[in-house]
Amino acid sequence: MEKTAGIGRRDFLKSTATSLGGIAYLSASLTRPPDAPDKFEGTRVLGRTGIRLPIVSMGVMNTDNPQLVRAALDAGYVFLDTAQGYQRGTNEAMLGEILKDRPRDSFVIATKASLPKDQATGGYGPDATEEAYTKKIDTSLKSLRLDYVDVYHHHGTWTREATLHEPILSALQKAKKAGKIRAIGVSTHRNEPTVIDAAVESKVYDVVLTAYTFRQQHAAGVQKAIAGATGAGLGVVGMKSMGGNVRGAYASGQIDARACIKWVLQDPNVHTVICGFTTFDQMTLDMTILKDLTLSAAEREQLRRASMEAGLYCQGCGGCVGQCAQGLPIPDLMRAHMYLYGYRNLVAAQDLVLSLALPRDICGECVACPVACANRWNLRDRVRDIVRLRDVPTSFVA
Amino acid sequence: MKTSVWLGLALLGLALWISPSSAASAQPFAFPSVDGWTPAGQPQVFAPDTLYDYINGGSDLYLKYDFEELAVVEYRKGAMSVSAEVYRHRTPDHAFGIYSQERVPSAEFLAIGAQGYYENAVCNFIQGGYYVKLSGENTGTDDRATLLEFARRISAKLSGPSALPEILAAFPAEGKKANTEKFIAKDFLGYGFLHSGFTADFDRSGRTYQLFVIAGNDSDDARAMLQQYLKQIKHEAPVAEGVYQVADPYHGAMALLWKGRHIWGTIGLSDAELRAAYLKYFEGVAAR
């Protein structure tokens, strides 16, 4: 292979890093919508509930510090998210003690409960009755010392069948009719697109609370389902913006929570994100997102690095196969990309690229890439980036 | 090039080998047999990065308490079932911490492990670094006895001290509300630099408030925490062992005592006289 003039190993690595443009492969989801107002107002309407909320909200689950909740409400947080199961009910009770001293129209609260499910199938048994779920709702109201809650979520479903479990839907509808709850929600931490689609199908749910993070391998599926939900008038609340159920997120080290939250809020179909802060400083910092959703260069770099850990690796789902007009072997090219940027193994990456017998004119006459990646990767940039390895002399690499 | 690649891979391998997640070498908990009851399948085991699969969003709090491993099994006997969950945390203090977050002070407390309680088909207890949660389904009128039998069997297989954290005994008995002691493992008082603390609720003459103690790793650690705290609340005073009366923007008037590796204090106590009395009490404890 001839050496291309002006390209050496160091230059190559430098230029490819630059070509990533910080987080180029996240760019589609990280840019603000073109019609976004110049001055971001910091609130969105929670679908057909009509409730206008700040785009950042407080997830209370991680704290037993009532002063933190009071400070958050004083600072401008409006929406509190809890659950009957958090700290075995003591989280709801703590909120009840705090909220009894505040005007009812000064806050919006969501809580949630489930009934025992089969952990293997996610389905409900015969004990999951309307009566049992109604008791859950009444217990929450008692703990919270409220006449009604704004959103009551059917908690933690991951199958269509459980989401549509009739006795629970009936209990929720009756509670809504009785004025115990203003809106019916469903929360999901896995298999989210299925649950969200089922929520739309039900015509009962008003709100979905979903895990949504840049680390999800199926983030594109979640994004699509969310778009469908908002199209049907549902409100959408994001959670687990830092990783949640994504394997490896726990061990992946520090990343600024604001970068993760902003990433979720780039999706205009997400109306608010619940933030699980536990310090006054975090509370104050998260609040700054209301004024500016722009991702700083440092935040983009953090997301890029975290994506390298959790999202660089092609899962081999095969969803892209057959979509490329040139018939490029996208999964193989993504594997080469992983070798280079994930493992820093230039030799393996080049060996793989050279073995693929790629056409000289990559991307041909395509103006826009027709290939949709489940990871929402910018495949065009990645492919064009990695195929340049062909132009680096093998003797130099070895 | 090849040398650097292999060196890099070797370093990566070393890093993975010594990472905390792989350092936990303890065997998963071996559940006991209980007469008449049959385990429904093999126990499931969850690690820090998979706990979410079992308890969803609830896992965040467990991770704050240095959760290491969960073993779960369901026992069955006819239509009855008992779910047994054994959570292992890094230290007995952390096991107590997560237990204290979920403990219901009004429950019936039991002499099992370091402490346990029964309430509405649930029996939870701690022992050493373990937090055990048992729940019955269709266990009827024998529910309490059944769960207690499981608790005893599991307790017999656990290692570690069967006592609550020793420092809790330093809180004054007068006015203390029973079973309200807690261990907050991170972000104590809502400040990231106060790494952990023990609290207890008090009620005297209709006034409810908390006392706390922060145990630093050593005197220098305690000094550093106090220094940061005073800076945070803009309290200008030289940092030296002794008492402080401060105004916290979020917690109001507080009394503090720093001595050695401990920082003692009051939360939510507006009565200046009582705060002063507690400072004297703390000084007495610190002098022991």
Image: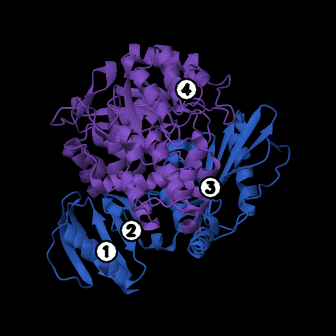
Q: In this view, does A129 lie to the left or right of A192?
A: right
Chain of the residue displaying label 1: B
At numbered mark 2, what does the secondary structure look like: helix, strand or loop? Answer: loop
Instruction: Give the residue number, with chain letter if any, for mark 4.
Output: A194
Whether pointer 1 and pointer 2 mark residues with C-beta atoms closer than 8 Å, the reply is: yes
Q: Residue at x 56, y 72 (%)?
A: B1
- The image position of residue B117, as x and y in percent, is 59, 52
Report how far apart the C-alphas of labels 3 and 4 lie in the structure.
26 Å
Chain of the residue displaying label 2: B
At numbered mark 4, what does the secondary structure look like: helix, strand or loop? Answer: helix
Check chain identity for marks 2 and 4: say if they share one: no
Q: Earlier in the sequence, mark 1 or mark 2?
A: 2
- Depth check, mark 1 against mark 3: the one in front is 3
Q: Residues within 10 Å of mark 1 (few under 14, many from 20)?
A: many
At numbered mark 3, what does the secondary structure look like: helix, strand or loop? Answer: loop
Instruction: Give the residue number, with chain letter if any, for mark 3.
Output: B47
Q: How crowded is mark 2: few (under 14 residues within 10 Å), some or many (20 or more)?
A: some
Instruction: Give the residue number, with chain letter if any, for mark 2.
Output: B195
- Depth check, mark 4 against mark 1: the one in front is 4
